[in-house]
Image (cartoon, helix red, strand yellow):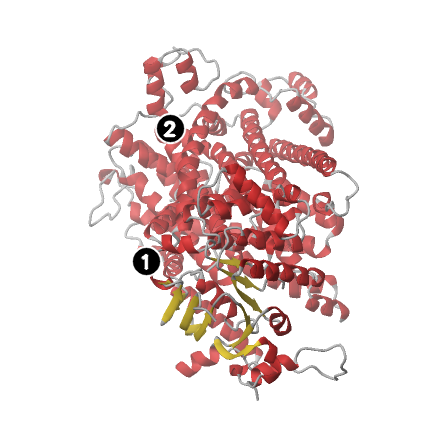
């Protein structure tokens, strides 16, 4: 951080500008990578810690509670549970790095394998959700700020508040009752109607893409009608957050002196808003969108439970109820890892691309 | 009356008391004029009253089952209908206010002082202590809160206390950040230097001068966070990791109503409205308080 | 003197506060031709609001009223927003106070100057960039090509203010308002920037309204000086006749300026209350 601001052009006047920028970029990337690694390590420490405080005996979970003493002891040694905690933690980190998240008690398969299968479903839904959130939320926020205190602004503010006050799982239930059961506008829980299941060979794991690749338009539209409601609900939360942040960023901009300068020049109000006020917020807005995307992946846990959506959130809650700790921690690690990565990358992008911070 | 309000809003108060009362008067007035904030105040007050006077407000015993009266729609006798065990939903919602209030209070009491203290220490002392505290804080801040709370409750075991602890563990870092930022803004101010010259100890400066100054932005942030805490707690209850049956926790009530959502919509819908209204109340109150106490961080006028 | 470009009578700018409406400009009248007019006053005297109200830049809840507010035969208060836009920049322009805040941080200097030109007509791209470079050269920027490609945070304050002047003069307006154009700059470049403004205004035969708190500076660069206090005009003087100022407030302003060849034990301060000098 400090070298970003310390290296004023005047202080490094003898170096060419390009070299100064390159040097700053390199040192920035090094620090960025270090902070990313540290955060991941922190996440691993937390999941490791959670794994230790579980009142379930991990050895019993493997050998079963009828195992003779000798078998139990052998398994305990084999799992490295006689080692000091710090050694166990290093072994744990090593195992995770090599892609070993343990065995799921309920599916009997490696957790990694399970997660690879369910993750695309989550990604598909969250991505559609963020698309809805950005496409609606950004223009809404800009409009609200441009016509501050107008009727439209009030509505957008209420929507923004609702995003903080409405429980996602409840909205999902009410949405199902209304749009699926009563109005029959959309299909019900799950990714596809039962009789379409397993027809399309998974290539990317994203059903919307795979069905189109396979030329199965009927299945594509069925998938659309299934994903629409859960994605729209995720999209609602995303647009609530994005429009609120866009509005407040824009209000801040519209109060800036250079926006007045643009008006002094006789620039039209539309250009004042989109070129002078909106362009400077693009970079912080990317961060906002990234945060929203990360929180949708996290928030999909609740929505997937409601919509029986076979994604990582559903996997996590099922594992929670079965006390399948390896699966719980694996899913936590993956969601947490994706969350952290998106967060950090957006933060990094912000620092690299904002001309003021260069 | 007018002389009193003139005395209170005098531009050059004659005494410290007059200045302080004047400030409160102006803040109170600003809050009073903000209709949405007053709505928030009313909702939060209503929640407290419901929780305290639950036995007098509820029309039925929230736990008594009556299988002859199961799944009745809202009526004069059962304002919000009855659930699958014939319990009165209105009464359960009223008693549920207690659980919500307990969790909210628990999280606030656990997190705010810790965050405040850590942040003030970090900001005031600086150096390697600052770097260490903020390093840990940043790591926690980048974590997904809901997922972490889920995993923690899974490990600790379900229940209100554990849900509260799990939420608390995931929400202290934000307060540390705020308190630190606030501390940094006046760390080098003259009055702090004056205290130091008078020989005040570091601990005394932090407790007597730094902490009180961080308080207002802290109150704003805690109030704004209440909605999120309520939603997370309800989410844990919904998944089955929060308050255990037969306790009338709102999230758990929605979970039970899930099977009847198509035909007996009121079972799941009514507690949901309670959550929405209470969360909204805290949001509105927080927004209003922010405008009054901490105007620089919010929308400008 | 020829017919004035701008005539203002009984201009009021009002803002609502918790203790009732406050007139930050409380009924002032003046006119401006192709001359150099200075407005002097302490901060809060309403001088900046006067400048901004001419461009109709006072945003609600602020209100502007006047018995007469005529520019080039049109009443500014009657114009639509679209008609007003055609005046802003093209006919009346304003140099803002601090280039650090008044230039858009994410647009290059060249883009921002070109925009002032493009807002008032369609010119071929080649001509626009040629005129931008000419204009930069006219405000004594030695390497216009390089400077045009810089971002505002990459130029110094003095250069930023010259960019600002270039941007405001490129559409060739009739009136230039300069609102404290040098108060954010280092003393060493202040005179340079004012000389550039002065030179350009003379060459183009424009009207200049120089708003400042610095009486000496204004009287040096202007033909006439209006002294404002608490939203009112205290006195109007020809700049050569400052010594003849009769109003006590003006006298106090003059007294407050320290001179090199004097030894004074104390500098007089301006009594604030009510704008009256005891």
Residue at numbered disc 2: A307
Q: Position of residue C128 (x, y in %)?
A: 53, 42
- Residue B124: numbered disc: none
Left or right of C158 in this view: A332: left
Estimate how packed mark 1 is, as few (under 14), some (14 to 19) or many (20 or more) residues with alpha carbons within 10 Å: few
Figure check: A208 above or below A288: above
Q: SS of the residue at dot 2?
A: loop
Q: Which residue, as the protein is rendered here, is positioned at the far left?
A: B76
Measured in 3D between alpha carbons, the distance from the residue under mark 1 to the one under mark 2, in whole angstroms, is 39 Å
Residue drawn at the location 52% of the way across and 67% of the way down:
C35
Q: Quadrant of the C terminus of chain C?
A: bottom right
Residue at numbered disc 1: B56
Q: Position of residue C56 (x, y in %)?
A: 42, 61
The quadrant where residue B47 appears? bottom left
Figure check: B24 above or below A81: below
The quadrant where residue C29 appears? bottom left
In the image, C80 versus A348, the foreground residue is C80
């Amino acid at each position: 951080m400090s070298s970003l601001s310390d290296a004023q052009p005047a202080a490094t006047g003898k170096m060419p500008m390009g070299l100064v920028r390159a040097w700053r970029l390199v040192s920035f990337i090094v620090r960025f990578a270090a902070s990313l690694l540290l955060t991941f390590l922190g996440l691993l420490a937390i999941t490791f810690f959670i794994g230790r405080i579980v009142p379930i005996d991990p050895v019993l979970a493997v050998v079963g509670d009828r195992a003779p003493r000798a078998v139990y002891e052998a398994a305990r040694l084999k799992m490295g549970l006689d080692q000091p905690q710090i050694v166990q933690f290093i072994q744990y980190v090593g195992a995770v790095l090599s892609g070993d998240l343990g065995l799921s008690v309920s599916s009997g398969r490696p957790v990694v394998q399970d997660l690879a299968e369910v993750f695309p479903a989550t990604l598909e839904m969250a991505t559609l959700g963020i698309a809805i959130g950005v496409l609606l939320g950004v223009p809404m926020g800009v409009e609200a700020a441009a016509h501050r205190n107008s009727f439209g602004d009030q509505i957008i503010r209420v929507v923004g508040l609702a995003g903080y006050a409405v429980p996602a799982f409840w909205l999902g239930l009410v949405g199902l009752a209304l749009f699926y059961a009563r109005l029959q506008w959309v299909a019900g829980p799950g990714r596809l109607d039962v009789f379409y299941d397993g027809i399309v060979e998974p290539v990317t794991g994203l059903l919307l893409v795979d069905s189109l690749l396979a030329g199965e338009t009927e299945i594509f539209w069925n998938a659309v009608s299934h994903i629409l409601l859960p994605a729209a609900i995720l999209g609602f939360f995303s647009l609530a957050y994005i429009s609120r942040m866009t509005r407040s960023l824009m209000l801040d901009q519209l109060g800036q002196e250079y926006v007045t300068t643009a008006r002094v020049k006789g620039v039209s109000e539309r250009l004042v808003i989109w070129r002078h006020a909106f362009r400077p917020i693009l970079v912080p807005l990317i961060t906002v969108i990234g945060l929203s995307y990360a929180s949708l992946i996290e928030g999909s846990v609740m929505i997937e439970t409601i919509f029986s959506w076979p994604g990582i959130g559903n996997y996590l809650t099922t594992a929670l109820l079965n006390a399948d700790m390896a699966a719980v921690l694996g899913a936590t690690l993956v969601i947490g890892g994706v969350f952290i990565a998106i967060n950090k990358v957006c933060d990094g992008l912000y620092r690299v691309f904002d001309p003021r911070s260069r | 009356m007018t002389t009193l309000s003139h005395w209170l809003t005098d531009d050059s108060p004659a005494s410290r008391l007059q200045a302080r009362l004047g400030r409160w008067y102006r803040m109170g007035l600003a809050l009073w004029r903000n209709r949405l904030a007053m709505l928030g105040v009313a909702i939060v007050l209503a929640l407290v009253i419901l929780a305290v006077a639950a036995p007098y407000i509820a029309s039925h015993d929230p736990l008594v089952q009556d299988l002859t009266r199961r799944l009745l729609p809202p009526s004069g006798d059962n304002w919000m209908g009855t659930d699958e065990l014939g319990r009165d939903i209105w009464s359960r919602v009223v008693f549920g206010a207690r659980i919500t209030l307990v969790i909210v209070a628990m999280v606030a009491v656990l997190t705010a002082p810790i965050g405040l203290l850590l942040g003030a220490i970090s900001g005031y002392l600086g150096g390697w202590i600052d770097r260490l505290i903020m390093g840990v804080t940043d790591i926690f801040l980048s974590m997904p809160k809901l997922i972490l709370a889920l995993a923690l409750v899974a490990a600790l075991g379900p229940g209100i206390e554990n849900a509260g602890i799990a939420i608390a563990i995931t929400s202290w870092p934000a307060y540390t950040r705020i308190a630190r930022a606030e501390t940094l803004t006046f760390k080098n101010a003259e009055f702090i230097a004056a205290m130091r010259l008078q020989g005040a100890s570091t601990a005394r400066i932090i407790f007597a001068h730094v902490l009180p100054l961080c308080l207002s932005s802290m109150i704003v942030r805690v109030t704004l966070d209440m909605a999120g805490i309520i939603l997370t707690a309800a989410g844990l209850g919904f998944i089955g990791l929060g308050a255990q049956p037969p306790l009338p926790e709102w999230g758990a009530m929605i979970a039970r109503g899930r099977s009847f959502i198509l035909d007996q919509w009121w079972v799941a819908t009514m507690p949901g409205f309670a959550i929405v209204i209470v969360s909204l109340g805290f949001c509105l109150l927080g927004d209003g308080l922010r405008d009054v106490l901490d105007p620089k961080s919010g929308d400008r006028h | 003197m020829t017919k004035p470009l701008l005539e203002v009578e009984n201009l009021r700018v009002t803002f609502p506060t918790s203790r009732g409406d406050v007139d930050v400009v409380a009924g002032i009248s003046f006119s401006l031709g192709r001359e150099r007019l200075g407005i002097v006053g302490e901060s809060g005297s309403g001088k900046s609001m006067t400048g901004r109200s001419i461009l109709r830049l006072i945003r609600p809840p602020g209100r502007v009223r006047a018995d007469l507010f005529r520019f080039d035969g049109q009443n500014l208060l009657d114009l639509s927003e679209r008609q007003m836009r055609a005046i802003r920049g093209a006919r009346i322009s304003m140099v803002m106070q601090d280039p650090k805040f008044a230039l858009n941080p994410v647009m290059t200097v060249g883009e921002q100057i070109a925009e002032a030109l493009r807002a008032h007509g369609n010119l071929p791209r080649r001509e626009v960039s040629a005129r931008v470079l000419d204009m930069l050269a006219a405000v004594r920027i030695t390497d216009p090509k390089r400077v045009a490609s810089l971002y505002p945070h990459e130029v110094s304050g003095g250069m930023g203010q010259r960019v600002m002047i270039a941007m405001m003069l490129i559409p060739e307006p009739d009136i230039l308002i300069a609102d404290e154009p040098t108060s954010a700059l280092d003393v060493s470049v202040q005179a340079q920037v004012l000389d550039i403004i002065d030179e350009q205004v003379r060459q183009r035969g424009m009207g200049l309204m120089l708003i400042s708190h610095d009486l000496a500076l204004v009287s040096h660069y202007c033909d006439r000086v209006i002294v404002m206090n608490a939203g009112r005009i205290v006195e109007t003087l020809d700049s050569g006749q400052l010594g003849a100022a009769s109003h006590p407030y003006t006298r106090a302003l003059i007294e407050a300026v320290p001179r090199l060849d004097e030894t004074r034990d104390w500098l007089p301060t301006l009594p604030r209350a009510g704008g009256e000098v005891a």
